[in-house]
Image (cartoon, helix red, strand yellow):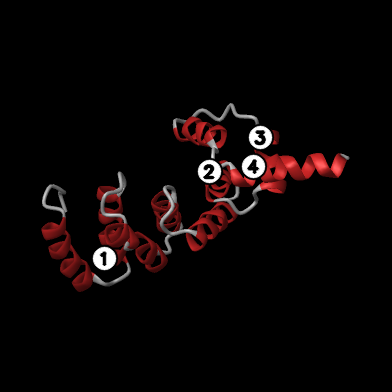
Amino acid sequence: MKYFCNYIILFSFIFSEDFSELKSYIEKVEKGDMDIPYEKIYSYEKIVPNHPIYLYLRGLIEIDGDKSVEYYKQLYSMDPNHDYADNAAMKIGEYYYSKGLYVQAADWLKKMPIYYSRSDHIERAVKLFLNSLIVSGNRDTAIFYSRVFKRQFPSLDV
């Protein structure tokens, strides 16, 4: 009987795409409020360990940057069209940029204007992408892309 109840709970989570509880935790963390029930969040690991919303939240609350990037990469590789995929790509790019890994940062930040041109992060992504190219010795490529982005995003200060 115990296993039957567990299966019912499991299937109710899998088939109900309502992850509003996890989304509310994401909103809190993104606003800087870390007062969230970590144990409850970790309990989702057994139920939906590969769901993009769960992976994004785990990436946000993870203390180890390398592990956090792995969560974001897993989300991105599973569903690059998910609502949080642009956030994940941006966070990966920012992480590599902050570590001084400018070539890897440029690879991830380039995804933003190509695939997520309507993202809220587009201006920051373009600037970091161009800076990554310049710092990594690809100034000519940065100049080329800056011209492309001026045409693609006329309202941005490139």
For disc 4, the marked residue is 13
For disc 1, the marked residue is 134
Mark 3, secondary structure of its residue? helix
Q: Residue at x 30, y 53 (%)?
A: 125
Residues tagged 3 and 2 counted as in contact (Cβ below 8 A): no
**Badge count:** 4
As shown in the figure, which amino acid type bears the numbered disc 3?
Tyr
The x, y position of residue 103, in whole percent, is: 38, 68
Ranked by sequence position, the earlier of labels 4 and 1 is 4
Q: Residue at x 34, y 62 (%)?
A: 111
Residues tagged 4 and 2 counted as in contact (Cβ below 8 A): no
Q: Quadrant of residue 136?
A: bottom left
The x, y position of residue 109, in whole percent, is: 34, 59
Q: Nearer the viewer, residue 11 or 106?
A: 11
Tell me the CA gap for discs 4 and 3: 18 Å
As shown in the figure, which amino acid type bears the numbered disc 4?
Phe
Q: Nearer the viewer, residue 143 or 35?
A: 35
Tell me the CA gap for discs 4 and 2: 21 Å
The x, y position of residue 29, in whole percent, is: 50, 34
Q: Residue at x 50, y 63 (%)?
A: 77
In this view, the mark in front (4 or 3): 4
**Which numbered dot is residue 38?**
3
The x, y position of residue 104, in whole percent, is: 41, 66
In this view, the mark in front (4 or 1): 4
Ranked by sequence position, the earlier of labels 2 and 1 is 2
Tell whether 150 sits left or right of 62: left
For disc 2, the marked residue is 60
Up-down: is 134 above or below 81?
A: below
Ranked by sequence position, the earlier of labels 3 and 2 is 3
As shown in the figure, which amino acid type bears the numbered disc 2?
Leu
Tell me the CA gap for discs 2 and 1: 29 Å
